[in-house]
Image: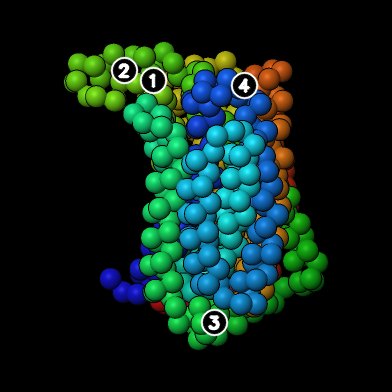
Amino acid sequence: MKRDHLHFLLLNFGHFLDHLFTLVFATVAALALTREWDLGYADLLRYATPGFVAFGVFALPAGWLADRWSRDGMMGIFFIGIGFASIVTGFSQTPLQIAIGLFVIGIFAAIYHPVGLAIVTAKWKNTGMRIAINGVWGNLGVASAALITGYLIDNGSWRAAFIFPGIVSIILGIAYLALRWKTVIHPDSEPDTAGRAAVSLQMPDVTALLFRVSLIVFVTTAVSGIIFQSTTFALPKIFDERLQGLAAGMAGWLQGFDLPGHTDIATLVGTFAFITFAIASMAQLVVGAMLDRHGPKTVFMTVAAMQLVFFLIMPGLRDGLAFAVALGFMLGAFGQIPINDFMIGKMATGRRRAQIYGVRYVVSFSVLAASLPMIAFVYEHWGFDALFRILAAAALIILAAVLALPHRLPVAATGHSDA
């Protein structure tokens, strides 16, 4: 395997682990700690909030440090730091301890998006598809958090869901540093060719257009963050409530095959979540290809409209229909992820690319953190049907904002190396 291919693979593994670590607790809270610690689901969500605050706030300093020191060095810190933090969190004995552990995980998790995406958009051509492939790996991390944790709850302990991936992350961090040690020590040995080649299009009033597009990017980033966090974090609980009949029927069918551990309801709920996340993540590949061909406006409008329709349909549904419609709105939720990253990668200059991605993810993940109390409040007072209607309104806001996008971006990044 070429070193560049291995580099991209390790970056993809990093995105997988980044999202897995931040969502292990979502399944643990829904399927284990409500029983083991005798706390309500809404109460447990409050302990996850500091971690998502860190996930957002520390993205900006991570991008700033990467641009001034070494992006590859920061990636090494990400792998090893989040691995150790996750292992320690696995030994928590109280809600306060797990909140502290999740906060430290959030600090290291904040490194990946501004730094990893800056590397991907600076080094390789076909930006839309590269971001999409990298995004699929991240979404598989989201999916695997529910699957792996659900399985471990039924067959062992929730603690292993933090400890095992922590060990894997440390091993991958050592491998990453070994592969990229030259650029860790000498960051300028691999120049940002994409950033240097960025040129302005010949358009009237480019500055005003840049401002308008940037405003749309950050507004849609904030609103789509509400949708993404609400769907990915709450889906295990939604399925736990609404797919019991489907899970029981599947368990009865599987009993005839004598498959140990595959007829437990928690495992099946985790499996349904994994299937939904895994299939929905493939939408990013389609979106990535369409971005490279047609640009962001048409693609973004399609994705926003898909979310609006399925969120409006979801209230009141259960079992098979609920599973099908959930898959529909998750296709939209995951499909929208690469679009703003694509636009930033095309417009941002290379020297400050990681910092700009840092600002983008401060907005995104700060909204994620704020979404947790909202999810808890809405669920506690009105249930998930009200949440679906709120998310439909959010999708409508995105659709309205995207209508103001130009058909061509004001800055085009060209000249990517064919690494």
- Which one is closest to the eye, mark 3 or mark 2? 3
Q: Amino acid at mark 1?
A: Ile
Q: Which residue is mark 1?
A: 265
Name the amino acid type tagged 3: Pro
Q: CA distance from mark 1 to mark 4?
A: 19 Å
Return the mark for residue 251: 2
One can see residue 312 in this view:
no
Label number found at residue 187:
3
Q: In the picture shown, does residue 415 fall above or below 291?
A: below
Among numbered discs 2 and 4, the one appearing first in the sequence: 4
Marks 4, 3: nearer the viewer: 4
Residue type (three-letter) at the residue carrying disc 4? Gly
Left or right of 308, for residue 148: left
Q: Which dot marks residue 40?
A: 4
Q: Nearer the viewer, mark 2 or mark 4?
A: 4
**Could you give the CA–CA distance between mark 2 and mark 1, rounded to whole angstroms?**
7 Å
Using a 10 Å C-alpha cutoff, classify the residue at mark 1 as few (fewer than 14 neighbours), some (14 to 19) or many (20 or more): many
Residue type, label 2: Ala
| Mark with earlier residue (4, 3) | 4
The tag earlier along the polypeptide, 3 or 2, is 3
